[in-house]
Amino acid sequence: MSDRSSWESRKLRYWAECSGQSRRAGLRSSHPAPAASPAQARLESLVLEHLGTSPSLCAHPFGIASLTSATTSLTLHLDAYMGQERYSFPEHCLSRLLPATPSPGSGDDVPGIPGLRVSGIDSSGRQLHLHTVRDPGHAATIVLVLPRGRGEGWADVERQHRHWYEDNGLRPLWTAPHLDPVESEDGKLLVSLGWAGARVVRVRW
């Protein structure tokens, strides 16, 4: 076995162990992170589910280099790349998290997290603020931070992502002020599967 193959094998075992522990525990631990509000816990559980399904490896479990937390927010510092092809992990995050209408006549579910919206981008262009409109009056926020050294900011990444959806006949939903009817239907399925009562704790790594 080559040194690279051995390294990839060790990395895969490490990633699998960490992601298995993180799937069971979520993104929080009781100390030192504060407990999440119910709405925040639901959002974090969905983010974990959507980011944890890729078979490609990142430098850190789930592509999250570090995180900071509060009761109604979670800030994720992202890896730059994923997989041997070094595909942009920030772009992957948008494709996994931001909702859009399904392909016409496909019968597919809403891609992304129903009800997730872009709140804005900070002045540096490195922090993308996301919130949910699924729980009116209950704050729940995710902040995605680009890795240092990246040339383009979130505005460029989001624009490219939006244009891809529009060019393929899909309608981006992440700037709509309210739930779209297709999201409401998808939300009924999430509740029936038990997401409404999900409890999430944070893990330190």
Image (cartoon, rainbow, N blue to C red):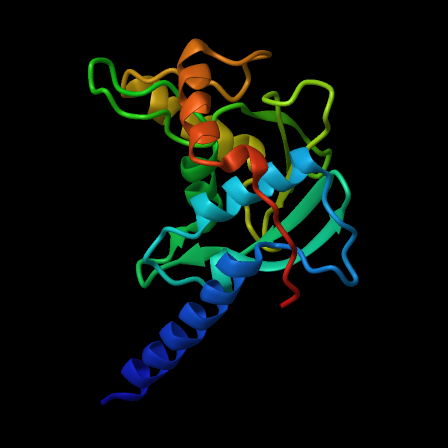
Q: Which residue in the rendered view is the most extreme toward the left?
A: 105
| Whole-percent x, y for residue 119 in the image | 65, 25
Q: Is residue 135 above or below residue 142?
A: above
Closer to us: 105 or 6? 105
Q: Residue at x 61, y 49 (%)?
A: 200
| Whole-percent x, y for residue 123 in the image | 73, 33
| Whole-percent x, y for residue 131 in the image | 64, 29
Q: Residue at x 60, y 12 (%)?
A: 177
Q: How many marks?
A: 0
Instruction: Tell me if 195 is positioned left or right of 167 in this view.
Output: right
Q: Is residue 52 above or below residue 129?
A: below
Can residue 139 be spotted in the picture?
yes
Q: Residue at x 39, y 23 (%)?
A: 163
Instruction: Tell me if 3 is positioned left or right of 191 in this view.
Output: left
User: In which quadrant is the C terminus drawn?
Assistant: bottom right
Can residue 160 be spotted in the picture?
no
Q: Is residue 71 above or below residue 117?
A: below
Closer to us: 203 or 142? 203
Q: Is residue 63 above or below residue 136?
A: below
Figure quadrant of residue 73: top right
User: In which quadrant is the N terminus drawn?
Assistant: bottom left
Closer to us: 63 or 190? 190
| Whole-percent x, y for residue 34 in the image | 79, 52
